Image (tube, rainbow, N blue to C red):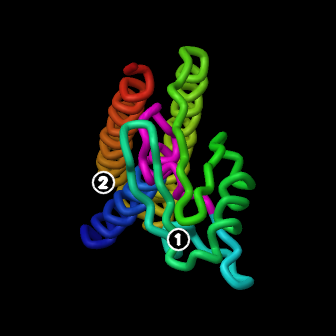
Amino acid sequence: MEDEIQFLLDTLKEQMNKSIAHLEHEYRSIRAGKANPAMLSTVMVDYYGSMTPLQQIANLSIMDAHTLTVQPWERNMLNVIEKAIHVANLGFNPTNNGEILIINVPVLTEERRRELAKQAKAESELAKVSLRNDRREALHELKKLDLPEDIEKDTEERIQKTIDKYSRLVEEHLAAKEKEIMTV
């Protein structure tokens, strides 16, 4: 019986860790005004008929705080990569010098910073919804175990404490991301 409860709690934690990992991944794509190769993580390039992540066909690096460089491993892919960056609709306009793409990351305006902070908050809300869904599923599985009432109540409390812990973690991630975005 205790093994089943522990398995349930471990499964819940695993699901919630996935939600946190997803939130962190989404936050990496929200730029905070400084150049970061992760900004291009969503760019998919048509590489000989197969959609391939940009980082698998080019070297991404930071030239300075506001400039990214993309150096493809095959020079003939330069125009294809440039087109893929435009299609990704990230707000970047790469400059092609024949060997590498240079992407100037514009300094964010106050209005754009607020928009990005709202976007970060929306992502954190989605993470919280995911956590609540994980809780609902765990409670549903708990009911299936047909445990004595006192053990069931105790397990429900343990589930709620776990949810609270992960909710605080989402809030901490949001606070850190908002601070990063709003810092000029």
Q: State the residue at coordinates (61%, 50%).
A: 95
The amino acid marked with disc number 1 is Pro
Q: Quadrant of the C terminus?
A: top left
Residue situated furthest left in the rendering: 2
What residue lies at 63% left-to-right and 68% top-to-bottom?
Answer: 78
Q: Residue sitting at 53 percent across and 51 percent down?
A: 102
Q: Does the residue at mark 1 contact the one at mark 2 (Cβ under 8 Å)?
A: no
SS under mark 1:
strand
Q: Distance of mark 1 from mark 2, alpha carbons?
A: 59 Å
Local crowd size for mark 2, using a 10 Å CA cut-off: few (<14), some (14–19), many (≥20): few
- Image position of 175 with respect to 18: above or below: above
Q: Is residue 177 left or right of residue 114?
A: left
Q: Earlier in the sequence, mark 1 or mark 2?
A: 1
Horizontal side of residue 170 vs 70, given as left or right: left
Q: Nearer the viewer, mark 1 or mark 2?
A: 1
Instruction: Name which quarter of the figure residue 168 lies in.
Output: top left
In the figure, is residue 95 to the left or right of 86? left
Comparing 28 with 127, the one in front is 28
Q: Is residue 136 visible?
A: no
What is the x, y in percent for residue 7? 32, 69
Q: Which residues are magenta?
A: 23-43
- Residue 41 is covered by the magenta coloring: yes
Q: Position of residue 68 (x, y in %)?
A: 46, 49
Q: Secondary structure at mark 2?
A: helix
**Corner quadrant of residue 47:** bottom right
Return the x and y of residue 35 as percentages of the image width and height: 43, 42
- Please give the residue where the numbered disc 1 appears in the rendered image: 72
Q: Which mark is residue 151?
A: 2
